Every structure is written in structure tokens, then in C-alpha cells.
Amino acid sequence: MTRKMNGISPAQKAAYLKQSREVMAKYDSFLKDNASFSKALVALSLLSLAAFIASMMKGA
């Protein structure tokens, strides 16, 4: 996915590359945070389901 960067000075190119790296780093950390949040949500829902089944067994 390379594009020709004609008409861009080396300083502008360096600034663009630096900015894109920073954005990718932020996005990567967001994905990691989001993944751990999803895992916690799944664990919480499984625990609540187990508690619900246990309460149904006691009532039966």
C-alpha cells in the first residue's frame, strides 16, 4: 500500500510518517484495551448466567 509522495518535501514526509506512527500506536493500544474489556464483559455474563442457572436449580 505504497503511494508516490511526489511534490512533498522530506520534512513534510517525515512529519507525516511520524504522525501516522503515533496514530497507529494509539489505535493499537485502544484495541488492546478494548479486547481486555470484552474479555471482562464475557466473564461477567458467564458468571451471571451460572448464578441464574444455580438459582433455577434451587427453585426446582
Image (cartoon, rainbow, N blue to C red):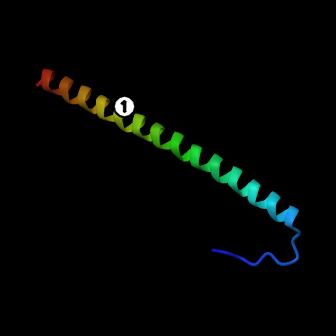
Mark 1 residue crowding within 10 angstroms, few (<14) / some (14–19) / many (20+): few
User: What residue appears at the point 71 percent right and 76 percent down from the top-left corner?
Assistant: 3
The residue shown at (82%, 57%) is: 15
Q: Is residue 36 above or below residue 3?
A: above
Judge left or right: residue 56 versus residue 31: left
Considering depth in this image, is 30 or 41 the residue closer to the camera?
A: 30
As drawn, the residue found furthest toward the left would be 60
Residue type, label 1: Leu
Residue 10 vertical position relative to residue 37 in the rendered view, above or below = below
Residue behind mark 1: 44
Furthest toward the front, the residue is 10
Q: Quadrant of the C terminus?
A: top left
Q: Position of residue 27 (x, y in %)?
A: 62, 50
Query: Which residue occupies 58% across, 43% down?
Result: 29
Q: Position of residue 10 (x, y in %)?
A: 85, 66
Front position in the image: 18 or 38: 18
From the viewer's perspective, tell me whether residue 33 is left or right of residue 56.
right
Image quadrant in which you'd find residue 17: bottom right
